[in-house]
Amino acid sequence: MTRHGARPHLLDRNRSNQKYFNIIKFLLVIVHTVNKNLDVRSLHEHSSGAVGRGNLMVETGKSENTRILLDLLNSVESDGGQSQRRLASDLGIALGLVNAYLRRCVKKGLLKVTEVPKRRYMYYLTPQGFAEKSRLTVEYLSVSFDFFRRAKAECGVVFNTARERGLPRVALAGISDVAEIAMICALDTGVTVVAIVDERAASTKFIGVPVASSFKAIAGTCDAVVITDLQRAAELSERASTLFGRDRVFTPNLILPPRRVPSEKWT
């Protein structure tokens, strides 16, 4: 085969490789963001008494707890003499929470602490601490990739349903990690994401897609709306349904508002 004849094949292969490269890049960003920006305390509060979405919040809270502990052990391994204030800044958590994690690690035998001059403390990883760090690394990646797989599968179901109903142009409601995953799914389902609605967004574009401040701003440009905001799913669904109709508003199961479970009375 001549060089000229092979060129279309090479172009197709390069495009395919680029597509998978972009997916991997998105995945790495999502794995970091979904664990870095969530507050572990609010996750525990939202997860109590919830069904469905509550299970997701519990799992994500577990992932966040694993992330904090893993980052703490990594930081101590690299510099056991750094201050708790610096640790709090690096980990993105409150100073009191750092102290609580350090005390727990010492109690569990993961860290050893010695006092150094100027009333400071030096922390060291014990053999048990090194083993726990390795275990947490595997657990952290497992939970993060599981979230990605679940979100991708459910976004795919939503997009396929919209396409089958003759609604190929969709808008996402809420900039979030789920929105990033939804952008990946759109590539494989034949659905086009034409806009993202988020009045709190500081930028005018998200992954190359225009960002609008209201649903009215996108009226006439899309056929359906997919809710991608984890915290305001119910509110955004109601607002979108008022303008587009309930049959044109879709919410992936993993972010559906939790059903209230009647609390047991204490006797």
Image (cartoon, helix red, strand yellow):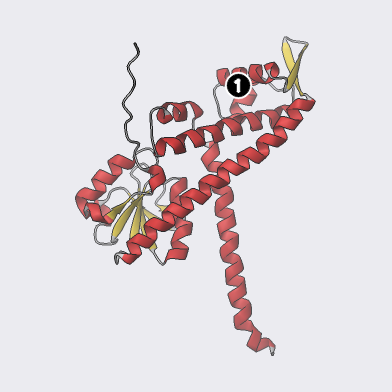
Across and down, in percent, residue 32 comes to: 57, 43
Which one is in front, 85 or 67?
Answer: 67
Circle 1 Cα neighbour tier, 10 Å, few/some/many (<14 / 14–19 / ≥20): many
**Residue 90 visible to an observer of this rendering:** yes
- Measured along the vertical axis of the image, is residue 4 above or below residue 129? below
Q: Looking at the picture, which amino acid does disc 1 mark?
A: Val
Which one is in front, 226 or 108?
Answer: 108
**Is the C terminus in the top left, top right, bottom left or bottom right quadrant?**
top left
Q: Residue furthest front?
A: 267
Query: Residue at coordinates 55% horizontally, 37% vertically from top-left?
Result: 36
Query: Residue at coordinates 62% horizontally, 30% vertically from top-left?
Result: 90
- Measured along the vertical axis of the image, is residue 256 above or below residue 95? below
**Is the N terminus in the top left, top right, bottom left or bottom right quadrant?**
bottom right
Judged left or right of residue 80, residue 14 is: left
Query: Residue at coordinates 31% horizontally, 54% vertically from top-left?
Result: 225
Judged left or right of residue 232, residue 176 is: right
- Measured along the vertical axis of the image, is residue 76 above or below residue 180? above
Quadrant of res 107: top right
Q: Secondary structure at mark 1?
A: helix
Q: Which residue is tagged 1?
A: 98
Across and down, in percent, residue 55 comes to: 44, 36
Query: Residue at coordinates 26% horizontally, 53% vertically from top-left?
Result: 217
Which one is in front, 61 or 19?
Answer: 61
Quadrant of res 97: top right
